[in-house]
Image (cartoon, rainbow, N blue to C red):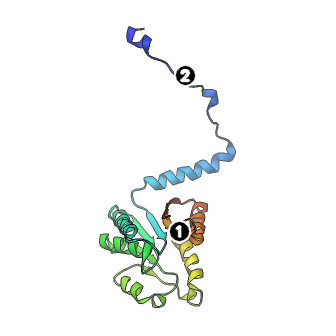
Amino acid sequence: MSEENKNEQQIMVPLDDLDKVEESDSHTLDALAMELATIQQSAKKVAIIGSRNLPITHQQIIEILSYALVIQGNTVITSGGSSGTNAATIRGAMKANPDKLRVILPQTIGQQPSDVQDQLIGVPNIIEHPDRSMMTLADASRICNREIIDECQQLICFLSHTSNTLHKAIQHAEDSHKVVTAFYLD
């Protein structure tokens, strides 16, 4: 041994202390493998949902995020909305490539406020649900969030800790083995 190597410390790693994979953990490993494959995919369907009540700076960040996701070749899925997360998502995706934006409405375009209807002009991929026209907007929105999540591979959600509806949406996404990123605004 050379003089330099004598002064170096050696670290021994005990192999018997390593975690062992149990057969019952195989479903967890499969889920992790699926999530890793989704993250590494070059183009995917990314859902962006969240709060309507956002400061303008948060809306600008969401708009830039949506723009960047579309520029990278992803399809962005969201719902209609005159302010907040959905509106910012639509603005960003429309600037990048309208064909890579998919808007799923909780009800119909005609049931949306006029400013939402104006924002949806030029969006080529809009899904309406006239079958939900008699539902409350809250109930139709819960179903819409699930539909959006079912179509995506990754969910990005902007919410506060008190947003029960959005927490349930995140739980649905996790139960469906989607890659989930939650940004808490409070």
Label at residue 85: none
* Horizontal and vertical percent position of residue 12: 55, 22
* Horizontal and vertical percent position of residue 161: 56, 65
Viewer-side residue, 175 vs 80: 80
Viewer-side residue, 171 vs 54: 54
Location of residue 38 with respect to 97 vertically, above or below: above
Three-letter code, disc 1:
Ile
Left or right, 32 with respect to 25, comes to left
* Horizontal and vertical percent position of residue 177: 57, 59
* Horizontal and vertical percent position of residue 186: 50, 64
Question: Which quadrant of the rendered structure holds the N terminus?
Answer: top left
Three-letter code, disc 2:
Met
> What SS does tag 1 mark?
helix
For mark 1, does the 10 Å Cα neighbourhood hold few (<14), some (14 to 19), or many (20 or more) residues?
A: many
Q: Nearer the viewer's eye, disc 2 or disc 1?
A: 2
Whether residues under marks 2 and 1 lie with C-beta atoms below 8 angstroms apart, the answer is no
> What SS does tag 2 mark?
loop
Name the residue located 34 percent from the left edge and 65 percent from the top edge: 64
Left or right, 163 with respect to 123, comes to right
Name the residue located 47 percent from the left edge and 56 percent from the top edge: 38
Location of residue 153 with respect to 131 vertically, above or below: above
Label at residue 149: 1
Label at residue 12: 2
